[in-house]
Amino acid sequence: MTKHRIYTMPFAKVYPHYVAKAEKKGRMKAEVDEIIRWLTGYSQEELEAQLEKEIDFETFLAEAPQLNSSRSLIEGVVCGILVEDIEESTMREIRYLDKLIDELAKGKPMDKILR
């Protein structure tokens, strides 16, 4: 079975889209970074290093220092699918991040986004 295309896509290619989505709605890159650090456990320096290495999305998540245990509280629809119903773990992690960025772009306060 072939991997979904997003798994092999460099995280550094997706990251600017997250930032652009947030900035288009008046939010900041620093908030996007805070969400990613909260979800993955990367420090800012580690996040920047991963972006420079241009590792794929799957590896970015697999090498995450400490996936946040509260991420299971993230619920809702992303791309027409309930995040909590996604069975494949890597895809669920990707969609958790997508959902958090969506919430940021919709103006939700950071203390509510970072459950």
Image (cartoon, rainbow, N blue to C red):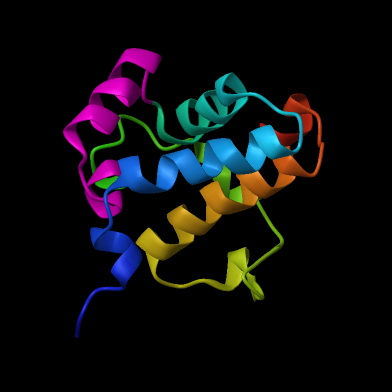
Identify whether 4 is placed above or below 48: below
Say which quadrant the C terminus sits in: top right
Q: In the current view of this chain or complex, which residue is farthest to the bottom? A: 1
**56 with respect to 45 (left or right):** left
Q: Is residue 17 above or below residue 35?
A: below
Spot the residue most to the top: 45
Q: x and y percent of residue 89 in the render? A: 39, 62
Q: Is residue 84 magenta?
A: no
Q: Residue at 57% across / 19% down in the picture?
A: 30
Quadrant for the N terminus, please: bottom left
Please provide percent x and percent y for residue 18.
54, 42
Residue located at (29% from left, 61% from top): 7
Q: Nearer the viewer, residue 30 or 71?
A: 30
Residue 70 in view, yes or no: no
For residue 13, side relative to residue 92 (left or right): left
Q: Nearer the viewer, residue 114 or 7?
A: 7
Q: Quadrant of residue 65?
A: top left
Please give the range of residues in magenta.
Answer: 42-60
Task: List x then y, in percent, for residue 4.
Answer: 31, 73
- Above or below: residue 1 compared with residue 57: below
Corner quadrant of residue 114: top right
**Main SS class of the magenta portion in the image:** helix
Residue at 57% in and 25% down: 29
Residue drawn where x is 24% and y is 23% of the image: 49
Q: Is residue 54 magenta?
A: yes
> Residue 23 versus residue 100: which sits nearer the camera?
23
In this rendering, position of residue 62 left or right of residue 67: left
Side of 13 where 93 appears, left or right: right
- Specify whether residue 11 is in view: yes
Q: How many marks?
A: 0
In the rendered image, residue 95, in percent from the top left (x then y), is placed at 52, 58
